[in-house]
Amino acid sequence: MILQPISIEIPALGPWLEQCFERNITARQLEAMAWLLGFWIGDGHRKGAKIALNSEDHDVNARLRENAKVWGMTLRAERGNGLGAQGYLHTYNGAVRNLNKNNPLVKVLEGLRFWENGEKNGLKSVPLFMRTEQIVVREAFLAGLIDSDSSCNIQGGSIRAEIATVYPPIGDGVNFIGRSLGLTVSVHFRGANFSERHGLKESDLWTFHYMVGQIMKHSGRY
């Protein structure tokens, strides 16, 4: 178990992007892709560049739109029932709209095995190289994950974020990455059970609580 931040940085995402797309990758492009990967791990569909959205979460949806644009993708959202919506990250070939074809995000998901088997519809996974990636990549990845699939609050003077997953490869990855960045991480496990309330069998569930910093208590107006 990691109890201290990891200072070692072994770039993998950046060099892979430069090789795949045959061009220099800017710091902004690297950060945007890392954030998109985290967001997809949290709320992406295993089929590819399709993402579950909250239609009222305007700040997060705007961030998704901006980071997708950095990579030449356009976000199209379809409103569902209630606050739910489906987001599609499209690329265009003239007037032809594509989803997974020639899609930068999908290329990374396949090429770097964010699908466990490296193929669409495979189980999601956080590849081992992410544990020792550049700190900026780990931070952006975790930020995307928290933006997509986390609840945040202030508790006991600390900022606290909660992430839940039923997939052990994701749990192992986000636990390691959080600790590697110096965050305090606690884990709660709920074993598989039958929910009488919902009439369904529920899978094993890991819930991760991230805590960072102490909120200073100020007197006066600010």
Image: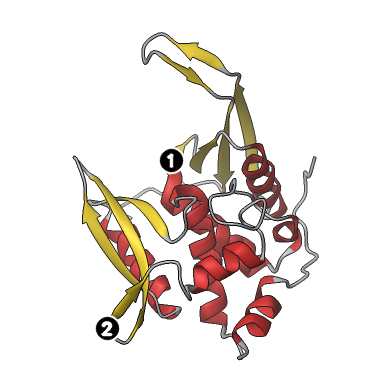
Q: Position of residue 101 (x, y in %)?
A: 46, 72
Q: Which residue is mark 1?
A: 154
Q: Position of residue 210 (x, y in %)?
A: 57, 42
SS at circle 2: loop
**Left or right: 51 with respect to 126?**
left
Determine which of the numbered discs, if any, sits on residue 95 in the image: 2
Determine whether, in the image, residue 212 is placed left or right of residue 101. right
Q: How far apart, in angstroms, are the residues tagged by discs 2 and 1?
A: 47 Å
As helix, strand or loop, the secondary structure at mark 1 comes to strand
Mark 2 burial class by Cα count in 10 Å: few <14, some 14-19, many 20+: few
* Left or right, 57 with reference to 51: left
**Residue 32 visible within the image:** no
Q: What residue type is disc 2 on?
A: Ala
Residue at horizontal 36 percent and vertical 11 percent from the top: 197
The spot of residue 60 in percent (x, y) is 34, 58
Residue nearer the viewer, 123 or 6: 123
